[in-house]
Image: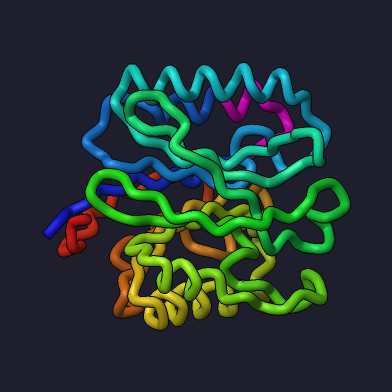
Amino acid sequence: MKTVRVLGVQMPVSKKLDENLERILSHLKPTDADFVLFPEMALTGYHGDFSQKAVERAWSQIAEACRQTYTTALVGTGSKNGEGTYIQTRVYGANGELMGTHEKIMATSKDREFCRPGGELRVFQHAGIRFGCLICNDLWVTPGCGPYPDPRLTYQLGKKGAQVIFHSVNSGASSIHAPFHESNLVLRAIESRVYICTANAATNEGPVNCPSGVVSPEGKWLVQCPRDGEQTYTCDIEGIAEE
């Protein structure tokens, strides 16, 4: 059986790439964590008005930091290609190589004002486990955020063999959404028998409405950060069948 250590980073996310990059790099240091998880759009900020060249330079710095510190990082970012702009999680291995990406599939109506939805649900194998990535609304498909059916992506990842889901979030401080977000994390972890690790973006508007932490397949919170300001958590996920 495998034990995996996850470091989750709840950090403020500004519109300035350089500020965000500095924060990200400050958390990519020698650690005994197997994975370091950052919030949605942690690098670029939550908008589509960024320079792809500047973003690619920042990706190179993140990859080099992973290589130098033997850290595997899951970094939220914006990304542009010939087809459009995407909200993305990039997975960099401890050797600095890009293992793959996940593009937000259930982009909200506001997201779609500047980005396209992704189309592929991927499962990765690393550090002896199988895992997938989801981004914010991918998991809970919040009512009022668009007239889109819920494809139950957590369930789909579980059927694909994922044991852990890394959930990058930038959900704000609206308290009315907190019960829905929390109950969805718990119920979907139970339904698919997966661990769900979340990292939310801190906000100046009050406590975040989705905890940064880890939910077990039994629906128990193994750890939660305080909901205000920049925080980190460390969690040992024990008893995973090694792949």
Residue 193 found in image quarter: bottom left
Way the structure is coloured: rainbow
Q: Residue at x 79, y 51 (%)?
A: 116
The answer to whether residue 148 is above or below residue 64 is below
Specify whether residue 20 is painted magenta.
yes
Work out which quarter of the rendered image holds the N terminus and state it.
Answer: bottom left
Establish if 19 lies above or below 111. Answer: above
| Residue drawn at the location 83% of the way across and 63% of the way down | 109
Give the residue at the far left of this rendering.
1
Q: Residue at x 54, y 64 (%)?
A: 210
Front position in the image: 102 or 109: 102
Task: Please tell me which residue lies in front, 128 or 58.
Answer: 128
Q: Is residue 74 left or right of residue 214?
A: right
Residue 215, position as x, y percentages in the image? 36, 68
Q: Residue 51 colored magenta? A: no
Q: Is residue 214 visible?
A: no
Residue 133 as seen in the image, left or right of residue 149 = left
Q: Which span of residues is magenta-colored?
A: 13-21
